Image (cartoon, rainbow, N blue to C red):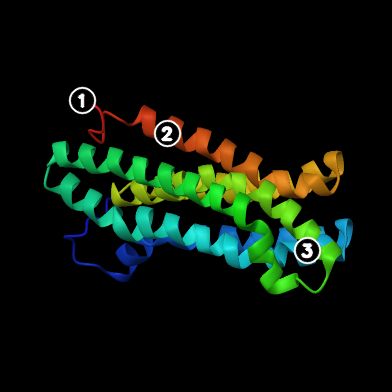
Amino acid sequence: MQVKLADHFTYRRLLKFVFPSVVTMIATSIYGVIDRLFVSNFVGKSAFAAINLMMPFIMLSGAFGFMIGTGGSAPIFAYNFGAKNFTELRNIFFKTIKIISVTGLALTISAELLADVMTSIFVGYDENLQSLTVHGFRIYSISFLFAGFNIFASSFFTSMNNRLISAIISVVHTLIYESGSVLILPIIFGMNGIWFSIIVAELLAMIVSTTLIWRLRYKYKIIM
């Protein structure tokens, strides 16, 4: 059953339309539990504290991805696709990609340069913990280069009324790659494996997202 924004929404249609968003939130919550449980029990309280200290800055970077990919561009994609205005659809698509790329690069550079200043706000009283947090944050911030695109890709497929692929991206990204990386890499690389796990997960998810967009580029008139 295809769900269109112009349809009369029954409960069944509404639940089917919001399905990808629900799956994304559930997957993110499960990953959060796995991440915190593994880190706190197997790596140590210092790494667990460092991750929680980084979260405000990580959430801030994620907000840009949601703002541009979900709240900003998705309604425009849906409107132009429904109106068969494919020229404008392609125009907005590539402009959004450029904005996400520049924003991700700016966030990564800012995090690298300002890690000491930002972490000192929360943990300046403990030199060892701040050093660990700065080290982890500088590695973790490399993932900002890829994270925005993955958020955008899932939202793009939702706006194109392809909720199944949107849900697949969310599940593969969060439950498989992020959870798998945080469980495996620390065993191999120790504490650094925690910081690198999100980079590996985001990069692998970006490969999946890019592949799906490329395979469906003609269906959604991204490339003629």
Residue 133 x, y percent position in the rendering: 75, 59
Q: Residue at x 58, y 60 (%)?
A: 58
In this rendering, position of residue 93 left or right of residue 38 = left
Q: Secondary structure at mark 3?
A: helix
Amino acid carrying mark 3 in the image: Gln
In this rendering, position of residue 157 left or right of residue 187 = left
In this rendering, position of residue 136 left or right of residue 200 = right
The mark total stands at: 3
Q: Earlier along the polypeptide chain: callout 3 or callout 2? A: 3
Which sits in the foreground, 37 or 141?
141
Q: Measure the C-alpha gap from mark 1 to mark 2.
A: 17 Å
Residue 104 x, y percent position in the rendering: 48, 47
Which sits in the foreground, 42 or 136?
136
The reply to whether dot 3 and dot 2 touch (C-beta < 8 Å) is no
Q: Residues within 10 Å of mark 2 (few under 14, many from 20)?
A: some
Can I make out residue 23 in this image? no
Q: Residue at x 72, y 49 (%)?
A: 195
Residue tagged by mark 1? 224
Residue tagged by mark 2? 212
Residue tagged by mark 3? 130
Q: Earlier along the polypeptide chain: callout 1 or callout 2? A: 2
